[in-house]
Amino acid sequence: MSPTTSPTHCLLHLALPQALEDGLLDALLALPGPSPVLEVFRAESLGPDVPLPTALEQVRGRSQRRIVQLLLPLADVAPLLQALDQAGVTAGLRWWTTAVLAFGSHE
């Protein structure tokens, strides 16, 4: 299958505290329209401004995080972030986008 080229799509990365993972995923899956395909990764954050809410994180000096990625049209990023904010699942959320030049799947 040949890839789809699309300068209008992006990969949205959502970095969030581990404790918020289930709430964010539920909110994403509850959005109107087709449910997006989500990729979820474990991650750790460290640095002077990174909160360390648990004793384990304080001892290790790293915050347990999750990275959620989804492919979507760039024009849908702002409305999606607004919907997540209205759902109350954006505390501690950091996000960014990367350009997607092509995408596809093999079945």
Image (spheres, rainbow, N blue to C red):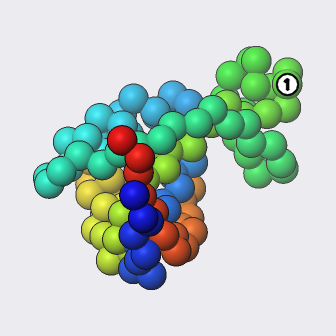
Badge 1 crowding class, 10 Å Cα cut-off, few under 14, some 14 to 19, many 20 or more, is: few
Q: What's the residue at 46%, 34% (across, down)?
A: 20
Q: What's the residue at 73%, 36% (across, down)?
A: 44
Q: Is residue 34 above or below residue 98?
A: above
Q: What's the residue at 57%, 69% (across, down)?
A: 98
**In the orientation shown, which residue stands out farthest toward the bottom?**
7
In this picture, residue 5 sits left or right of residue 94: left
Q: Measured from the top left, where is residue 32 in percent x and y?
A: 14, 52
Q: Measured from the top left, where is residue 73 in percent x and y?
A: 34, 71
Disc 1 on helix, strand or loop?
helix
Q: Is residue 40 above or below residue 33?
A: above
Q: What's the residue at 68%, 22% (across, down)?
A: 54
Q: Measured from the top left, where is residue 99 in percent x and y?
A: 54, 73
- Label 1 sits on residue: 60
**In the orientation shown, which residue stands out farthest toward the top?**
56
Q: Is residue 91 visible?
A: no
**In the orientation shown, which residue stands out farthest toward the front?**
1
